[in-house]
Image (cartoon, grey):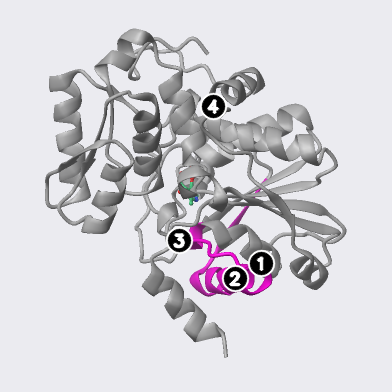
Amino acid sequence: MAEKSKSHESTAHDLPDLHSVFEAQKRIEDVIWETPLVDSPAVARESGAAEVLLKLESLQNTGAFKVRGAANKILGLSDEDRSRGVITFSTGNHGKAVSFVSGKTGIKAVVCLSEHVPAYRVQKIRDLGAEVEVKGHSQDEAEEHYYQLMESRGMVPVVPFDDPAIVSGQGTIALELLRRRPDLDMLLVPLSGGGLLAGIAMAAKSINPNITVVGVSISQSPAMLESVKAGHPVAVEEKDTLADSLLGGIGRENYYTLPLIQKYVDQHVVIDEAEIEKAMVYAYIQHSLVIEGASAVGIAAIQSGKVAVAGKRIASVISGSSVDPAAFLKVLQKHVH
Ligand SMILES: *Cc1c(COP(=O)(O)O)cnc(C)c1O
């Protein structure tokens, strides 16, 4: 997509398409890794699925898929925009991804964080290459500081999901999946702001309209699902969760991920905390994988029987590995005897 405007100034919000996903794949190939797709026979057997495959974005560069979208956005900028530098305010995997890509390419990046973000996280983002601005007592105040800096320094915003370049970057996962396994019947994708699901659903359904794409939300923060039901963005109350990467709303104004999810996603399921714990333990016991709660929801959707899987060939996106060690240990202690 030829994207000139840096914000939502233009009135036409053309949705990204399969072509922009192929362009993204080419653009980001030196920065990301093609992640393994591993067979998970135990859950297939238990559930009656023909096959369950795990797409291990938890082993992606920086520990989550977010680097795909961030790389596509940043590497697609004009020379002029590159020289202005980029800015974001995410504490989590998106902040790491933006910092990593900018560090790798020598493009200046600023990540705005609140004073409450733990020091080890601040350090991790800084180590990857970005300049970190710690200011404000809450995420909202950090966001306010982000807007001020964006204006005063003229930096280019890199938002976490509602941007065609971000969506197209995340969609490259579908290209890897369907090139390896064109016979897949169903994809299970964790859902928060929807960049991951929108990109994968749009790309996969454009290649094979018969594939079933399922969005997996958490009961503690199902903002996109409630927005799909309402037909417009709605905010939901957020509660504590092991799947902290799935917290957050979809934006008061949403131009890309909500329309794409409305258009391409076949089905939605909602997973609770106990189901997330069980799926994290499964990944550890069966595969020696440490995955974060957000990554486990696809496995949980199968284990819980909330999605009809009998006889199907299924791929579940394991989206990231960034779990607090103490929280992970607690889950193991509770379930492993
Ligand atoms: C960001 C993130 C998600 C959700 O992606 P969205 O594009 O916001 O829906 C899922 N899992 C992990 C590990 C993430 O970092």
What residue span does the magenta drawing correspond to?
267-294
> Around disc 4, counting alpha carbons within 10 Å, would you say few (fewer than 14), some (14 to 19), or many (20 or more)?
many
Q: Is mark 3 within 8 Å of ligand 1?
A: yes
Residue drawn at the location 47% of the way across and 54% of the way down: 222
- Amino acid type at circle 1 is His
Give left or right: position of 309 versus 255. right
Kind of residue at disc 3: Ala
Vertical position of residue 321 compared to residue 227: above or below: below
Disc 1 marks which residue?
A: 287
Give how far apart the Cα atoms at labels 4 and 2 are. 30 Å
Q: Of circles 3 and 2, which is in front?
A: 2
Quick one: label 3, few (<14), some, or many (20+) residues within 10 Å?
many
**For the residue with label 1, is its CB less than 8 Å from the closest atom of ligand 1?**
no
Q: Residue at x 41, y 41 (%)?
A: 250
Q: Position of residue 33 (x, y in %)?
A: 58, 38
Q: Quadrant of the C terminus?
A: bottom right
Which dot, 4 or 3, sits closer to the camera? 4
The mark found on residue 28 in the picture is: 4
From the top left corner, tell me how far across and down residue 204 is, in percent.
71, 34
**Residue 10, position in %: x, y?**
37, 12
Three-letter code for the amino acid on which mark 2 is drawn: Tyr
Do tag 2 and tag 1 residues touch (Cβ < 8 Å)?
yes
Q: Which residue is mark 3?
A: 243
Task: Please state if 156 lies on the left or on the right of 187 as rendered.
Answer: left
- 10 Å crowding of disc 2: few (<14), some (14-19), many (20+): few
Q: Secondary structure at mark 4?
A: helix
